[in-house]
Image (spheres, rainbow, N blue to C red):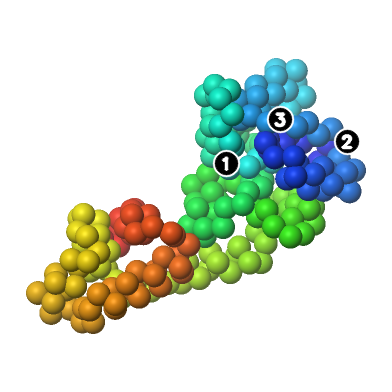
Amino acid sequence: MFKKVLIAEDHQSSNYSVQKAVEDLNIPDADYVYYCDHALTWLKNALRDDNPYEVLITDLSFEDDHSVQKLTNGTDLIKEARAIQPDLKVIVFSGESRPSIIDDLFKVHGIDGYVRKARHDADHLKEALQAVYNGKYYQPSDVKKAIRDKNAYEFTTVDIAIVSLLYQGELQKNIPDHLKRRNIKPSSLSSVEKRLNLMKETLGFTKNEQLAVYCKEKGLI
């Protein structure tokens, strides 16, 4: 099992789950910091002393308490940490539930594990640490399913037309008229709303803007 772990987490209740996982696995050297800037400094100091951390466990969101910080979120911390220590293992421990965000953490930022803050999260953290230690990636089953559903979603011609109009800045209420002029059916406002809600729910978005940007980035529009 890992011997040296750094935890970046600003909530005491969440810290308890991490502490329990660390204690149950008998990890002897675990340090806790509340700010991303501090976490990066500790990582640098450990490298300087030739005693590097093996794993970084970090949240994604950190509350602003008026203490000026250069790094304000876990994603930025992961980028900077990997820049100075490419072989550092990273486990994200967050309340984020959107499949698109979680999927990008693995594909874009190369994290090794993701644990969502929820019931039994201490147990999932232990599973994550054990899996990552054994050279595997870790995602709880519900996260895996959500990501599979996201990647399995098939956009219809109507979906693409609706999202394209949104990306071009068209208001949702005006989209039916555009669809009718193109002879695209169904084109009622209720149908447009249903398609948008289905896409957002499946892909884990809450706003039309997020959906439009996602589709543009994926080359769908």
Separation of marks 1 and 3 at Cα, in angstroms: 14 Å
Which of discs 3 and 2 lies nearer the camera? The answer is 3
The image's mark for residue 33 is 3
Tally of numbered discs: 3
The three-letter amino acid code for the residue at tag 2 is Pro
Left or right side of 125 for 28:
right
Q: How far apart are marks 2 and 1 (CA)?
A: 27 Å
Instruction: Look at 84% across and 47% down and name the residue there.
Output: 20
62 vs 43: above or below:
below
Name the element at disc 1. loop
Whichever of labels 1 and 3 marks the residue nearer the N terminus, that label is: 3
Q: In this orientation, which residue lies closer to the viewer: 73 or 136?
A: 73
Instruction: State how far apart marks 3 and 2 are (Cα).
Output: 17 Å
Q: Mark 2 sits on what residue? A: 28
Residue 206 in percent (x, y) is at 43, 59
In the rendered image of this protein, does residue 174 appear above or below residue 109? below
Q: Earlier in the sequence, mark 2 or mark 1?
A: 2
